[in-house]
Image (cartoon, grey):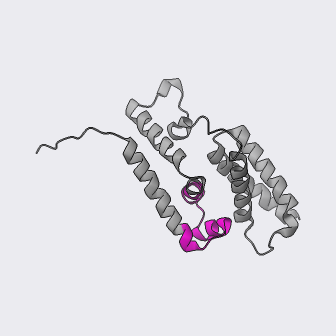
Amino acid sequence: MHGIDDQLRELLPRLRRFAHSLTRNSSSADDLVQASLEKALGAWAGKRPDGDLRAWLFAIVYRQFLDAQRSASRYRRLLELFTGGQDEHHEPSAERTVVAQTTLAAFERLPHEQRAILLWVTVEGLQYQEVAEILGVPIGTVMSRLSRARQALRQLSDGEITTPSLRVLK
């Protein structure tokens, strides 16, 4: 069991980072990780011995999050994610704030699964096969869903951002 303890300690920061990206709140993220680890330990006997521990734990965190979302209110402190939580001495430009708010609003409107796929691949650096194992779908389905998630985010963002049309003079 000592080897498993070491693996869990190594994965804990990644699980917290993923949970924080879902909840947008450190306290809620810690609660989510704790509940997920409790569930994982309770289900340990049913875990496939040849399965990837990281993918299995990410799947549990994701499912716990979805369960909590069914009864929880919408996300808080969303702007901090895109502005980096800058202090009052280094306020972002108005344009950057509008773009961040628009992108964040678009990201928030994506279905949970599309947000998770984007986070797993772009933030966590999971391989498509690992995401496929988490979701229990073929790798081609992951690729298709990721493509649709990226396209949906672009379309939602483009529909919100209104930039004045400029004529290029030569």
Q: Is residue 47 visible?
A: yes
> Which residue corresponds to the image point at 48% horizontal and 45% vertical from the top-left?
106
Asked whether residue 125 is drawn in magenta, I would say yes
Q: Nearer the viewer, residue 57 or 14?
A: 57
Asked whether residue 14 is drawn in magenta, I would say no
Percent position of residue 150, x then y: 46, 57
Relative to 145, 42 lies left or right: right
Q: Is residue 13 visible?
A: no
Percent position of residue 143, x then y: 52, 68
**Residue at the left extreme of this rendering:** 170
Relative to 39, 133 lies left or right: left
Q: Quadrant of the C terminus?
A: top left
Q: Nearer the viewer, residue 111 or 82?
A: 111
> Which residue corresponds to the image point at 73% horizontal and 64% vertical from the top-left?
56
Number of numbered callouts drawn = 0
> Which residue corresponds to the image point at 30% horizontal and 39% vertical from the top-left?
163
> Which residue corresponds to the image point at 50% horizontal and 67% vertical from the top-left?
144
Answer with the quarter of the image where residue 77 lies: top right
**Type of secondary structure dominating the magenta stretch:** helix
Q: Quadrant of the N terminus?
A: bottom right
**Residue at the front extreme of this rendering:** 71
Percent position of residue 20, x then y: 66, 45
- Figure check: 142 above or below 25: below
Percent position of residue 134, x then y: 67, 65
Relative to 166, 107 lies left or right: right
Q: Which residues are magenta?
A: 116-142
